[in-house]
Image: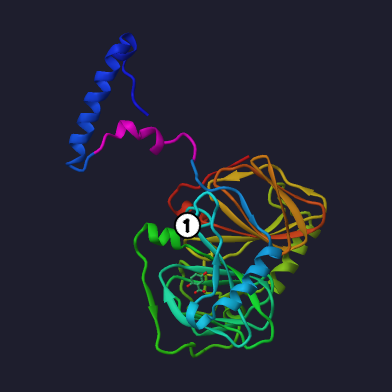
């Protein structure tokens, strides 16, 4: 967008010369790897957030069929991880669902393993369908059940396996685009395929999430020591909030997954919630600077984003772009999981919310 000077306005004939002179100047400075800020300032410093991210939804009825077909075309041995990337339609080919987060659906078939590796990106899993698979993180195995929220912190070794009888699918969310933005991505593979476990299955929840901490636990830790926040433990808390009327008018009866060491978010780059929308819930409008990924754990409903409705039911995934106004509605009782980069924005003093 060209700057129009007062002299150009007074004398339109001069405009061509001014533009030509400027272009010649821009061409000249480009050889010195410099560029005029005044041509791009309005795109850089915006009065409100700008985003290429679009609202989008992935229906589980489609996702399940396509995932099972992926099971026919590739094995975990070759794929390392059999994941279909959820591409935001506003940024196709960029392997991201929001500008900062990657999302994918992972499938592991009976008898398969996905080898142990680690990377500087942090990951979370939200289990959708199937039982009998496990994920092993930092020497602890945890069985994966519908609605379980599992974290894999930065550089934590992890492998997945399915000794059961059913295909198991889950939502993966990683902070990969953030790590790649910082150009700080490392990964490492191990000689063995599976980690040797050195804790009982599900040990970290029992050890850290019961109101006591092992004596001598660190006073600060920038990620949660809990590997799996089981749905079976979280769901009754939502019921308690509902019973006492602790229902946020925008978010419903909501818990925040917390790091028991300091009450902070589970990971420095990603924060998650589980929310019950009571039958007949009509949420107040809300927006925030963290583009948010939702997955439905129970029931069904509609989320109106920027005036457009997205209908969702069990295991559907949808995304709300940053700073777009949305409103949840649920004709029947529903439970929604959500995850975003809010902790990263808060750490940088950027996060804002509004109506
Ligand atoms: O399970 O380790 O969706 O490394 C993307 C990268 C899952 C995983 C993904 C990964 C993983």
Residue 212 seen anywhere in this rendered image of the structure: no
Residue 72 seen anywhere in this rendered image of the structure: yes
Q: 215 left or right of 330?
A: left
Residue 312 location, x and y as percent? 72, 56
User: In the picture shown, does residue 298 fall above or below 288?
Assistant: below
Q: Is mark 1 within 8 Å of ligand 1?
A: no
Q: Residue at x 31, y 14 (%)?
A: 8
| Residue 185, picture quadrant | bottom left
Residue most extreme to the top:
10
Q: Quadrant of the C terminus?
A: top right
Q: Which of the two residues, 321 or 78, is positioned nearer the viewer here?
A: 78
Q: Residue at x 77, y 63 (%)?
A: 239
User: In the picture shown, does residue 255 fall above or below 53?
Assistant: below
User: In the picture shown, does residue 224 fall above or below 5?
Assistant: below
Q: Residue at x 33, y 32 (%)?
A: 39
Q: Which residue is mark 1?
A: 93
| Residue 211, picture quadrant | bottom right
Crowd around label 1: few <14 · some 14–19 · many ≥20 (10 Å): few
Residue 238 location, x and y as percent? 73, 63
Q: Which residues are magenta?
A: 35-49
Q: 256 left or right of 185?
A: right
Residue 192 location, x and y as percent? 44, 90
In the rendered image, residue 90 lying in the magenta stretch gets the answer no
| Residue 119, picture quadrant | bottom left
Q: Quadrant of the N terminus?
A: top left
User: In the picture shown, does residue 289 fall above or below 334?
Assistant: above
* Colour scheme of the picture: rainbow
Q: Which of the two residues, 6 or 80, is positioned nearer the viewer here?
A: 80
Residue 187 location, x and y as percent? 38, 74
Judged from the image, the secondary structure of the residue bearing numbered disc 1 is loop
Q: 185 left or right of 173?
A: left
């Amino acid at each position: 967008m060209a700057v129009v000077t007062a002299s150009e306005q007074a004398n339109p004939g001069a405009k061509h010369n001014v533009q030509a002179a400027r272009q010649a100047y821009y061409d000249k400075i480009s050889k010195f790897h410099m560029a005029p800020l005044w041509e791009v300032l309005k795109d850089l410093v915006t009065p409100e957030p700008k985003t290429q991210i679009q609202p989008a939804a992935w229906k589980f009825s489609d996702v399940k069929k396509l995932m099972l077909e992926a099971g026919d075309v590739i094995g975990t041995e070759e794929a390392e991880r059999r994941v279909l990337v959820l591409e935001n339609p506003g940024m196709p080919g960029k392997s991201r669902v929001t500008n900062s987060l990657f999302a994918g659906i992972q499938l592991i078939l009976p008898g398969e393993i996905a080898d142990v590796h680690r990377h500087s990106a942090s990951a979370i899993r939200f289990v959708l369908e199937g039982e009998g698979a496990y994920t092993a993180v930092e020497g602890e195995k945890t069985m994966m059940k519908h609605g379980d929220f599992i974290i894999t912190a930065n550089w934590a070794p992890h492998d997945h396996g399915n000794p059961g009888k059913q295909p198991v699918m889950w939502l993966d969310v990683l902070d990969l685009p953030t790590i790649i933005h910082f150009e700080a991505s490392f990964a490492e593979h191990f000689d063995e395929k599976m980690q040797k476990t050195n804790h009982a299955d599900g040990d970290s929840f029992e050890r850290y999430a019961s109101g006591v901490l092992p004596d001598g636990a660190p006073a600060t830790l920038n990620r949660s020591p809990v590997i799996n926040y089981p749905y079976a433990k979280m769901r009754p808390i939502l019921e308690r909030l509902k019973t006492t009327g602790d229902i946020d008018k925008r978010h419903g009866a909501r818990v925040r997954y917390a790091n028991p060491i300091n009450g902070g978010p589970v990971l420095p780059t990603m924060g998650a919630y589980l929310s019950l929308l009571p039958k007949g819930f009509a949420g107040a409008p809300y927006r925030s600077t963290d583009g948010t990924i939702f997955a439905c754990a129970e029931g069904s409903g509609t989320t109106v984003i920027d005036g457009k409705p997205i209908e969702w039911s069990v295991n559907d995934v949808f995304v709300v772009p940053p700073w777009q106004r949305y409103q949840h509605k649920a004709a029947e009782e529903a439970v929604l999981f959500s995850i975003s980069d809010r902790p990263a924005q808060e750490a940088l003093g950027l996060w804002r919310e509004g109506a």
